[in-house]
Image (spheres, rainbow, N blue to C red):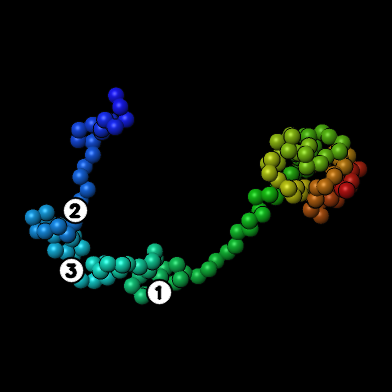
Amino acid sequence: MELNSIKPAAGAKHAPRRVGRGIGSGLGKTAGRGHKGQKSRSGGYHKVGFEGGQMPLQRRLPKRGFKSMTLKFNAEVTLAALEQLGLAEVDVAALKQAGLVASNALVVKVIKSGELTKAVKLNGIGATAGAKAAIEAAGGSIA
């Protein structure tokens, strides 16, 4: 077999549609574009979402809401999770290793959910007002 003799299997390739090549082809005269109108002309078409001059749907609807791009880098940990972790000093790396926060988390905050009895020192981790009070009541600190 030679590279110049390779051919696709019989019937695998169809001849391209030849439009505008006479009435015998079935696609002569208007070449399948119908009569008149913007879509029949060469170069005549419109943008995505164009509604013929009517105010497009994406401009009729009100703008609503906002989704922060940095939200995916924020994570939260509960007091109950810190209790189960059982470490005296906790930082973001320790939480990632334990699987309590996602590996792409940059900002971690402790929220008041559950009870904390052990003294825990937090390094580089924030806490809500209620969580901070609970941590300090248990003898811990936030650095």
Q: Residue type at mark 2? A: Arg
- Label 1 environment density (alpha carbons within 10 Å; few <14, some 14–19, many ≥20): few
Near-viewer residue (76 or 11): 11
Tell me where residue 38 appears, x and y as whole percent.
27, 70
Q: Looking at the rendering, which quadrant does residue 60 occupy?
A: bottom left
In the image, which disc is placed on residue 35? 3
Image position, residue 103 (x, y; %): 69, 40
Q: Earlier in the sequence, mark 1 or mark 3?
A: 3
Q: Which mark sits nearer the N-terminus, 2 or 1?
A: 2
Measured along the vertical axis of the image, is residue 2 above or below residue 73?
A: above
Q: Nearer the viewer, residue 2 or 139?
A: 2
Most distant residue in the left direction: 24
Residue 112 in sight? no
Q: Nearer the viewer, mark 2 or mark 1?
A: 2
State the residue position of label 2: 18
Q: Residue at x 89, y 46 (%)?
A: 141
Q: Nearer the viewer, mark 1 or mark 3?
A: 3
Q: Residue at x 85, y 51 (%)?
A: 133
Q: Amino acid at mark 3?
A: His
Residue shown at 38% from the left, 66% from the top = 47
Q: Amino acid at mark 1?
A: Met
Q: Which comes before the other along the chain, label 2 or label 3? A: 2
Find residue 55 and name its label.
Answer: 1
Distance between the Cα atoms at labels 2 and 3? Answer: 19 Å
Query: Badge 3: few (under 14), some or many (20 or more) residues near its Cα, within 10 Å?
Result: few
| Mark 3: secondary structure | loop
- CB contact under 8 Å: marks 2 and 3: no
SS for callout 1: loop
Give the tally of numbered discs: 3
